[in-house]
């Protein structure tokens, strides 16, 4: 798919956005729908209605349970609250809603603003692979190594990282890369390949590298490795949310460009 910069006006905000902006937001929701479907046996789930596309991991952490606004006029907050109250086998989970940036959203409170970056195949710039770095697909037996890196890299509890990462390993459509340096695991990242409302797309998240190995190009190498596999499998869009400006600069060197962001609302 070639870059389409023609502008149009979305219904909710009156802001002018590109078709790429819109596709990234839809692809983001596609990925969370895939995540919810994967986790349905664990108390999660996925739900699509005219107002919002809801997804849940079933875990008791708000950041792993969230919906994506589709149509503000049709969004029913009471119905969304009821749906999340049924997750985790009826125990309920905390949740939030992802809304296109700068939408006048009248429910809850703005919790955080996320940047969105996108990459199409013709803009992809492959980095050189560090000579001592080895990349491979993580399998179920690697879950402890993946969770340990995730916990350290993102300053999160190990048990939470273990619960989050375990279903991804060996799951159809999900690829977890494990990076090693001199035989020691030092980095991990995850991709989910979807073919839903936004077409064939890949979402990247959880790009984490242990502190002693940073500055060696490990994060860029893992990201590029996952992107190349997805593009080879027919994806025509890669997208992600950088954690900070340093990460954004890293992704820009691979060809990513900034698109319309996401506002995350809580306490809806």
Image: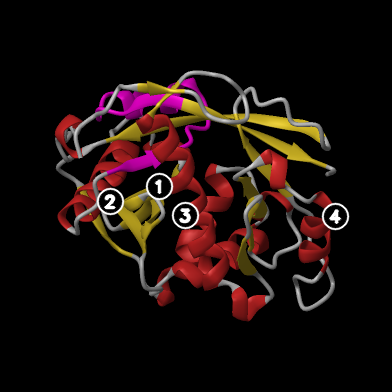
Which of the two residues, 193 or 104, is positioned nearer the viewer here? 104
- Label 1, secondary structure: give it: strand
Colour scheme shown: secondary structure
How dense is the environment of label 3, judged by Cα within 10 Å: few (below 14), some, or many (20 and up)?
many
80 drawn magenta: no
Q: Quadrant of the C terminus?
A: top right
Residue 168, position as x, y percentages in the image: 46, 67
Q: Tell me if 108 is positioned left or right of 12 in this view.
A: right
Q: Which of the two discs, 1 and 3, labels the residue nearer the N terminus?
A: 3
- Closer to the chain start, of discs 4 and 2, is 4
Mark 4 burial class by Cα count in 10 Å: few <14, some 14-19, many 20+: few
208 up-or-down from 61: above or below: above
The residues tagged by marks 1 and 3 sit, at their Cα atoms, a distance apart of 13 Å
Measure the alpha-carbon separation of dots 4 and 1.
31 Å
- Residue 5 appears left or right of 268: left
Q: Which residue is mark 4?
A: 78
Q: CA distance from mark 2 to mark 3?
A: 18 Å
User: What residue did someone put label 3 on?
Assistant: 30
Q: Which mark is residue 204?
A: 1
Q: Are marks 1 and 2 in contact (CB under 8 Å)?
A: yes
State the residue at coordinates (42%, 30%): 21
Residue tagged 2: 226
Q: Earlier in the sequence, mark 2 or mark 3?
A: 3
Rendering quarter of residue 212: top left
Mark 2: secondary structure: helix
Residue numbers of the magenta segment: 237-259
- Above or below, comparing residue 80 to residue 1 in the picture: below
The percent position of residue 117, horizontal first and vertical second, equals: 40, 31
Q: CA distance from mark 4 to mark 2?
A: 39 Å
Let me know if residue 242 is in the magenta part.
yes
């Amino acid at each position: 798919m070639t870059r389409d910069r023609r502008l149009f006006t979305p219904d909710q905000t009156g802001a002018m956005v590109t078709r790429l902006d819109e596709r990234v937001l839809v692809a983001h929701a596609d990925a969370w729908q895939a995540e919810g479907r994967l986790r349905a046996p664990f108390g999660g789930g996925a739900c699509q209605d005219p107002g919002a596309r809801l997804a849940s991991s079933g875990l008791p952490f708000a950041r792993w349970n969230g919906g994506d606004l589709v149509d503000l006029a049709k969004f029913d907050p009471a119905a969304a609250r009821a749906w999340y109250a049924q997750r985790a086998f009826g125990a309920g989970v905390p949740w939030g809603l992802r809304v296109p940036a700068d939408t006048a959203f009248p429910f809850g409170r703005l919790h955080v603003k996320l940047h969105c970056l996108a990459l199409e195949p013709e803009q992809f710039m492959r980095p050189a692979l560090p000579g001592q770095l080895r990349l491979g697909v993580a399998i179920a037996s690697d879950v402890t190594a993946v969770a340990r890196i995730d916990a350290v890299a993102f300053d999160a509890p190990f048990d939470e990282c273990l619960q989050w990462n375990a279903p991804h390993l060996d799951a159809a459509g999900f690829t977890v890369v494990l990076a090693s340096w001199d035989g020691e695991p030092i980095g991990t990242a995850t991709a989910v390949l979807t073919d839903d409302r936004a077409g064939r797309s890949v979402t990247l998240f959880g790009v984490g590298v242990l502190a002693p190995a940073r500055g060696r190009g490990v994060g860029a190498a893992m990201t590029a490795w996952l992107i190349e596999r997805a593009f080879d499998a027919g994806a025509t869009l890669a997208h992600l949310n950088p954690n900070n400006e340093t990460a954004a600069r890293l992704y820009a060197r691979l060809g990513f460009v900034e698109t319309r962001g996401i506002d995350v609302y809580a306490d809806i």
